[in-house]
Image (tube, grey):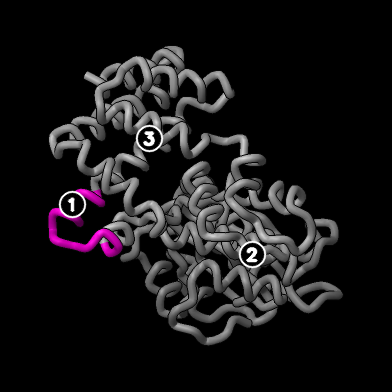
Amino acid sequence: MFDDDNERDIQTLLGDARRGKWDPVVVLVGTETFLIERAVRLLRKATVGDGPRGFNDDLFHGAGLVGARVAAAAKTLPMMAQARFVLVRGAHDAAPAELDALASYVSDPSPSTCFVITAEKLDGKTKLAKAAKASKAWLSVEPLKGGLLERFATGEAKRRGHVIEAPALAALVDATGNDLAAIDDGIERLSLYVGEGRPIDRASVEAVIVRVRVDTIWSLVDAIALKRTKVALEAALSMLDDREPPLRILAMVARQIRMVAKMKAALEDGMTQGDAVKAAGAAPFKARELSDSAKRFSEPDLRRALVILRDADVALKGSKREPEIVMEEAVLALCR
Protein backbone atom coordinates (compact mmCIF):
# COMPACT_ATOMS: atom_id res chain seq x y z
CA MET A 1 0.00 0.00 0.00
CA PHE A 2 1.02 3.62 -0.36
CA ASP A 3 2.18 5.46 2.69
CA ASP A 4 -0.43 7.74 4.28
CA ASP A 5 0.84 11.01 2.88
CA ASN A 6 -1.44 13.98 2.31
CA GLU A 7 1.11 15.50 -0.05
CA ARG A 8 1.25 12.49 -2.36
CA ASP A 9 1.53 13.45 -6.01
CA ILE A 10 2.15 11.53 -9.22
CA GLN A 11 5.92 11.40 -8.67
CA THR A 12 5.43 9.92 -5.20
CA LEU A 13 3.01 7.38 -6.64
CA LEU A 14 5.53 6.39 -9.30
CA GLY A 15 8.30 6.02 -6.74
CA ASP A 16 6.16 3.82 -4.50
CA ALA A 17 5.01 1.71 -7.44
CA ARG A 18 8.63 1.07 -8.44
CA ARG A 19 9.13 -0.32 -4.93
CA GLY A 20 6.16 -2.64 -5.37
CA LYS A 21 3.70 -0.57 -3.32
CA TRP A 22 0.18 0.08 -4.56
CA ASP A 23 -3.22 1.35 -3.43
CA PRO A 24 -6.54 -0.47 -3.87
CA VAL A 25 -7.85 2.51 -5.88
CA VAL A 26 -6.00 5.08 -7.98
CA VAL A 27 -7.88 7.69 -10.03
CA LEU A 28 -5.60 9.56 -12.45
CA VAL A 29 -7.22 12.65 -13.93
CA GLY A 30 -5.45 14.95 -16.38
CA THR A 31 -3.87 15.34 -19.79
CA GLU A 32 -0.25 14.38 -19.04
CA THR A 33 -0.51 11.00 -20.72
CA PHE A 34 3.19 10.19 -20.38
CA LEU A 35 2.99 10.13 -16.57
CA ILE A 36 -0.41 8.46 -16.56
CA GLU A 37 0.79 5.65 -18.82
CA ARG A 38 3.94 5.23 -16.74
CA ALA A 39 1.82 4.95 -13.60
CA VAL A 40 -0.44 2.36 -15.23
CA ARG A 41 2.56 0.31 -16.33
CA LEU A 42 4.29 0.43 -12.94
CA LEU A 43 1.11 -0.34 -10.98
CA ARG A 44 0.37 -3.32 -13.20
CA LYS A 45 3.90 -4.60 -12.67
CA ALA A 46 3.65 -4.07 -8.91
CA THR A 47 0.46 -6.13 -8.71
CA VAL A 48 0.59 -8.82 -11.40
CA GLY A 49 4.17 -8.61 -12.66
CA ASP A 50 5.32 -8.76 -16.25
CA GLY A 51 3.58 -12.00 -17.16
CA PRO A 52 0.94 -12.54 -19.85
CA ARG A 53 -2.08 -10.27 -19.54
CA GLY A 54 -5.62 -11.43 -19.06
CA PHE A 55 -5.10 -13.86 -16.18
CA ASN A 56 -5.38 -11.57 -13.17
CA ASP A 57 -6.05 -8.29 -14.91
CA ASP A 58 -8.99 -6.71 -16.71
CA LEU A 59 -9.21 -3.74 -19.07
CA PHE A 60 -12.34 -1.63 -19.59
CA HIS A 61 -12.94 1.49 -21.67
CA GLY A 62 -15.10 4.47 -20.79
CA ALA A 63 -17.20 4.26 -23.95
CA GLY A 64 -19.94 1.71 -23.25
CA LEU A 65 -18.77 1.17 -19.67
CA VAL A 66 -21.04 -0.88 -17.40
CA GLY A 67 -20.22 0.06 -13.83
CA ALA A 68 -21.64 -3.09 -12.24
CA ARG A 69 -19.49 -5.28 -14.49
CA VAL A 70 -16.35 -3.34 -13.62
CA ALA A 71 -17.10 -3.52 -9.89
CA ALA A 72 -17.66 -7.26 -10.15
CA ALA A 73 -14.28 -7.69 -11.86
CA ALA A 74 -12.58 -5.62 -9.16
CA LYS A 75 -14.19 -7.73 -6.41
CA THR A 76 -13.02 -11.00 -7.97
CA LEU A 77 -10.29 -12.70 -5.95
CA PRO A 78 -6.93 -13.20 -7.67
CA MET A 79 -6.21 -16.65 -9.03
CA MET A 80 -2.96 -18.20 -7.80
CA ALA A 81 -1.60 -14.72 -7.09
CA GLN A 82 -1.66 -12.09 -4.37
CA ALA A 83 -3.37 -9.34 -6.33
CA ARG A 84 -5.47 -8.38 -9.34
CA PHE A 85 -5.18 -5.34 -11.59
CA VAL A 86 -8.30 -3.71 -13.05
CA LEU A 87 -8.00 -0.70 -15.35
CA VAL A 88 -10.64 1.65 -16.73
CA ARG A 89 -9.26 3.82 -19.55
CA GLY A 90 -10.90 7.02 -20.75
CA ALA A 91 -13.48 7.27 -18.00
CA HIS A 92 -14.44 10.72 -19.32
CA ASP A 93 -16.29 8.88 -22.12
CA ALA A 94 -18.45 6.85 -19.72
CA ALA A 95 -22.07 7.63 -18.89
CA PRO A 96 -22.27 9.55 -15.57
CA ALA A 97 -24.64 6.96 -14.09
CA GLU A 98 -22.17 4.15 -14.80
CA LEU A 99 -19.37 6.06 -13.10
CA ASP A 100 -21.60 6.76 -10.11
CA ALA A 101 -22.16 3.02 -9.88
CA LEU A 102 -18.47 2.67 -9.05
CA ALA A 103 -18.57 5.12 -6.16
CA SER A 104 -19.57 2.54 -3.53
CA TYR A 105 -16.75 0.24 -4.64
CA VAL A 106 -14.20 3.08 -4.49
CA SER A 107 -15.33 3.83 -0.93
CA ASP A 108 -14.90 0.19 0.11
CA PRO A 109 -12.50 -1.53 -2.33
CA SER A 110 -11.14 -5.04 -2.33
CA PRO A 111 -7.72 -5.11 -0.62
CA SER A 112 -6.47 -7.66 -3.16
CA THR A 113 -7.18 -5.53 -6.26
CA CYS A 114 -5.44 -2.48 -7.63
CA PHE A 115 -8.27 -0.60 -9.37
CA VAL A 116 -7.05 2.21 -11.65
CA ILE A 117 -9.21 4.76 -13.45
CA THR A 118 -7.78 7.20 -16.02
CA ALA A 119 -9.58 10.21 -17.46
CA GLU A 120 -8.70 13.47 -19.12
CA LYS A 121 -11.34 15.22 -17.04
CA LEU A 122 -14.00 14.24 -14.50
CA ASP A 123 -16.64 16.35 -12.82
CA GLY A 124 -15.47 16.79 -9.25
CA LYS A 125 -19.06 16.92 -7.99
CA THR A 126 -19.95 13.36 -9.04
CA LYS A 127 -20.31 10.53 -6.53
CA LEU A 128 -17.24 8.83 -7.97
CA ALA A 129 -15.08 11.94 -7.69
CA LYS A 130 -16.19 12.61 -4.13
CA ALA A 131 -15.53 9.01 -3.13
CA ALA A 132 -12.09 9.04 -4.76
CA LYS A 133 -11.11 12.30 -3.08
CA ALA A 134 -12.41 11.15 0.30
CA SER A 135 -10.23 8.04 0.08
CA LYS A 136 -7.23 10.03 -1.20
CA ALA A 137 -7.26 8.06 -4.44
CA TRP A 138 -7.65 11.10 -6.73
CA LEU A 139 -4.50 12.45 -8.36
CA SER A 140 -4.43 15.36 -10.78
CA VAL A 141 -1.91 14.69 -13.56
CA GLU A 142 -1.50 17.83 -15.67
CA PRO A 143 1.48 18.86 -17.85
CA LEU A 144 4.49 19.81 -15.75
CA LYS A 145 5.84 23.34 -15.74
CA GLY A 146 8.87 25.22 -14.48
CA GLY A 147 10.58 23.59 -11.53
CA LEU A 148 8.50 20.43 -11.84
CA LEU A 149 9.90 19.85 -15.32
CA GLU A 150 13.41 20.21 -13.95
CA ARG A 151 12.55 17.87 -11.07
CA PHE A 152 11.34 15.29 -13.59
CA ALA A 153 14.48 15.55 -15.72
CA THR A 154 16.74 15.43 -12.66
CA GLY A 155 14.90 12.34 -11.43
CA GLU A 156 15.23 10.60 -14.79
CA ALA A 157 18.98 11.28 -14.78
CA LYS A 158 19.34 10.09 -11.18
CA ARG A 159 17.48 6.84 -11.92
CA ARG A 160 20.07 6.16 -14.61
CA GLY A 161 22.94 6.95 -12.26
CA HIS A 162 23.80 10.48 -13.39
CA VAL A 163 23.96 13.98 -12.01
CA ILE A 164 22.76 16.52 -14.54
CA GLU A 165 24.44 19.91 -14.17
CA ALA A 166 22.26 23.04 -13.95
CA PRO A 167 23.22 24.49 -17.37
CA ALA A 168 22.63 21.09 -18.97
CA LEU A 169 19.27 20.77 -17.24
CA ALA A 170 18.15 24.19 -18.48
CA ALA A 171 19.39 23.43 -22.00
CA LEU A 172 17.54 20.11 -22.08
CA VAL A 173 14.27 21.62 -20.87
CA ASP A 174 14.64 24.54 -23.29
CA ALA A 175 15.20 22.10 -26.13
CA THR A 176 12.28 19.81 -25.36
CA GLY A 177 9.72 22.05 -23.67
CA ASN A 178 7.25 20.17 -21.51
CA ASP A 179 7.33 17.08 -23.72
CA LEU A 180 8.11 14.46 -21.07
CA ALA A 181 8.59 11.71 -23.64
CA ALA A 182 11.24 13.84 -25.33
CA ILE A 183 12.94 14.55 -21.99
CA ASP A 184 12.93 10.87 -21.07
CA ASP A 185 14.28 9.90 -24.48
CA GLY A 186 16.90 12.63 -24.27
CA ILE A 187 18.12 11.50 -20.84
CA GLU A 188 18.37 7.92 -22.09
CA ARG A 189 20.52 8.97 -25.05
CA LEU A 190 22.61 11.27 -22.87
CA SER A 191 23.18 8.41 -20.43
CA LEU A 192 24.56 6.24 -23.21
CA TYR A 193 26.63 9.15 -24.55
CA VAL A 194 28.40 10.23 -21.35
CA GLY A 195 28.92 6.73 -19.96
CA GLU A 196 27.99 5.01 -16.74
CA GLY A 197 27.97 7.25 -13.66
CA ARG A 198 29.38 10.30 -15.41
CA PRO A 199 27.77 13.75 -15.04
CA ILE A 200 25.69 15.21 -17.86
CA ASP A 201 26.92 18.65 -18.88
CA ARG A 202 25.63 21.26 -21.32
CA ALA A 203 28.11 20.26 -24.02
CA SER A 204 26.69 16.74 -23.97
CA VAL A 205 23.14 18.07 -24.33
CA GLU A 206 24.15 20.21 -27.29
CA ALA A 207 25.99 17.30 -28.89
CA VAL A 208 23.29 14.68 -28.43
CA ILE A 209 19.87 16.29 -28.34
CA VAL A 210 18.73 16.71 -31.90
CA ARG A 211 15.65 18.66 -30.91
CA VAL A 212 15.40 22.43 -31.18
CA ARG A 213 18.73 24.01 -30.25
CA VAL A 214 18.45 26.51 -27.43
CA ASP A 215 20.58 29.10 -29.17
CA THR A 216 18.52 28.84 -32.34
CA ILE A 217 15.29 29.39 -30.45
CA TRP A 218 16.68 32.45 -28.70
CA SER A 219 18.06 33.74 -32.01
CA LEU A 220 14.55 33.49 -33.42
CA VAL A 221 12.98 35.19 -30.39
CA ASP A 222 15.58 38.00 -30.44
CA ALA A 223 15.15 38.50 -34.18
CA ILE A 224 11.39 38.80 -33.65
CA ALA A 225 11.93 41.38 -30.90
CA LEU A 226 14.26 43.41 -33.15
CA LYS A 227 11.97 42.99 -36.21
CA ARG A 228 14.79 41.35 -38.16
CA THR A 229 12.67 39.39 -40.59
CA LYS A 230 15.54 37.86 -42.58
CA VAL A 231 17.35 36.58 -39.47
CA ALA A 232 14.11 35.22 -37.97
CA LEU A 233 13.19 33.38 -41.16
CA GLU A 234 16.69 31.92 -41.44
CA ALA A 235 16.47 30.63 -37.87
CA ALA A 236 13.03 29.10 -38.47
CA LEU A 237 14.10 27.57 -41.79
CA SER A 238 17.21 26.14 -40.14
CA MET A 239 15.04 24.25 -37.67
CA LEU A 240 12.66 23.12 -40.39
CA ASP A 241 15.64 21.87 -42.40
CA ASP A 242 16.65 19.83 -39.36
CA ARG A 243 13.21 18.16 -39.64
CA GLU A 244 11.98 19.80 -36.47
CA PRO A 245 8.15 19.65 -36.49
CA PRO A 246 6.63 23.13 -37.01
CA LEU A 247 4.25 22.60 -34.09
CA ARG A 248 7.20 21.96 -31.77
CA ILE A 249 9.04 25.05 -33.04
CA LEU A 250 5.93 27.12 -32.47
CA ALA A 251 5.47 25.70 -28.97
CA MET A 252 9.07 26.48 -28.06
CA VAL A 253 8.83 30.05 -29.36
CA ALA A 254 5.58 30.53 -27.43
CA ARG A 255 7.21 29.15 -24.29
CA GLN A 256 10.17 31.51 -24.56
CA ILE A 257 7.98 34.53 -25.24
CA ARG A 258 5.74 33.71 -22.25
CA MET A 259 8.90 33.47 -20.17
CA VAL A 260 10.00 36.90 -21.43
CA ALA A 261 6.56 38.31 -20.58
CA LYS A 262 6.77 36.95 -17.02
CA MET A 263 10.28 38.33 -16.64
CA LYS A 264 9.21 41.76 -17.87
CA ALA A 265 6.23 41.86 -15.50
CA ALA A 266 8.37 40.75 -12.56
CA LEU A 267 11.03 43.37 -13.23
CA GLU A 268 8.40 46.08 -13.60
CA ASP A 269 6.94 45.00 -10.25
CA GLY A 270 10.28 45.85 -8.68
CA MET A 271 11.72 42.38 -8.28
CA THR A 272 15.45 41.87 -8.38
CA GLN A 273 16.83 40.14 -11.45
CA GLY A 274 17.38 36.97 -9.42
CA ASP A 275 13.83 36.89 -8.08
CA ALA A 276 12.39 37.84 -11.47
CA VAL A 277 14.06 34.93 -13.26
CA LYS A 278 12.58 32.54 -10.69
CA ALA A 279 9.15 34.09 -11.23
CA ALA A 280 9.62 33.57 -14.96
CA GLY A 281 10.29 29.87 -14.37
CA ALA A 282 13.81 29.96 -15.80
CA ALA A 283 17.21 28.86 -14.52
CA PRO A 284 19.16 31.51 -12.55
CA PHE A 285 21.98 31.74 -15.09
CA LYS A 286 19.47 32.89 -17.74
CA ALA A 287 18.69 36.09 -15.78
CA ARG A 288 20.70 38.46 -17.94
CA GLU A 289 19.54 36.89 -21.20
CA LEU A 290 15.90 37.14 -20.15
CA SER A 291 16.35 40.70 -18.86
CA ASP A 292 17.78 41.77 -22.22
CA SER A 293 14.87 40.15 -24.07
CA ALA A 294 12.37 41.77 -21.71
CA LYS A 295 13.78 45.19 -22.62
CA ARG A 296 13.47 44.49 -26.35
CA PHE A 297 9.77 43.56 -26.21
CA SER A 298 7.08 46.12 -25.44
CA GLU A 299 3.94 44.90 -23.68
CA PRO A 300 1.79 45.40 -26.83
CA ASP A 301 4.36 43.41 -28.84
CA LEU A 302 4.21 40.54 -26.35
CA ARG A 303 0.41 40.46 -26.37
CA ARG A 304 0.34 40.59 -30.15
CA ALA A 305 2.97 37.84 -30.43
CA LEU A 306 0.98 35.48 -28.22
CA VAL A 307 -2.16 36.05 -30.30
CA ILE A 308 -0.25 35.30 -33.51
CA LEU A 309 1.23 32.15 -31.99
CA ARG A 310 -2.19 31.03 -30.75
CA ASP A 311 -3.70 31.48 -34.22
CA ALA A 312 -0.80 29.62 -35.82
CA ASP A 313 -1.23 26.78 -33.33
CA VAL A 314 -4.89 26.47 -34.29
CA ALA A 315 -3.95 26.50 -37.98
CA LEU A 316 -1.30 23.83 -37.54
CA LYS A 317 -3.68 21.54 -35.65
CA GLY A 318 -6.81 22.04 -37.70
CA SER A 319 -5.89 23.39 -41.13
CA LYS A 320 -5.05 21.47 -44.28
CA ARG A 321 -2.41 24.05 -45.23
CA GLU A 322 1.23 23.04 -45.35
CA PRO A 323 2.66 23.32 -41.80
CA GLU A 324 5.87 24.92 -43.10
CA ILE A 325 3.86 27.69 -44.79
CA VAL A 326 1.89 28.33 -41.60
CA MET A 327 5.13 28.56 -39.67
CA GLU A 328 6.75 30.98 -42.12
CA GLU A 329 3.68 33.22 -42.18
CA ALA A 330 3.66 33.28 -38.38
CA VAL A 331 7.30 34.40 -38.31
CA LEU A 332 6.60 37.12 -40.88
CA ALA A 333 3.62 38.33 -38.85
CA LEU A 334 5.65 38.36 -35.64
CA CYS A 335 8.31 40.54 -37.25
CA ARG A 336 5.95 43.23 -38.56
Residue closest to the eye, 43 or 308: 308
Residue 45 within the magenta-colored segment of the rendering? no
Q: Name the residue under label 2.
A: 163
> Residue 312: image x %, image y %?
33, 25
Residue at the spot x=52%, y=59% of the render? 166
Q: Do the residues labelled 1 and 2 touch (CB within 8 Å)?
A: no
Magenta highlight range: 262-275
Compared with 82, 209 (above or below) is: above
Residue at the spot x=63%, y=68% of the render? 72
Compare marks 1 and 2 and give the one earlier in the sequence. 2
* Numbered disc 2: secondary structure: loop
Q: Name the residue under label 3.
A: 253
Q: Name the residue under label 1.
A: 265
Left or right of 19, for residue 11: left
Residue 144 occupies which quadrant of the picture? bottom left
The amino acid marked with disc number 3 is Val
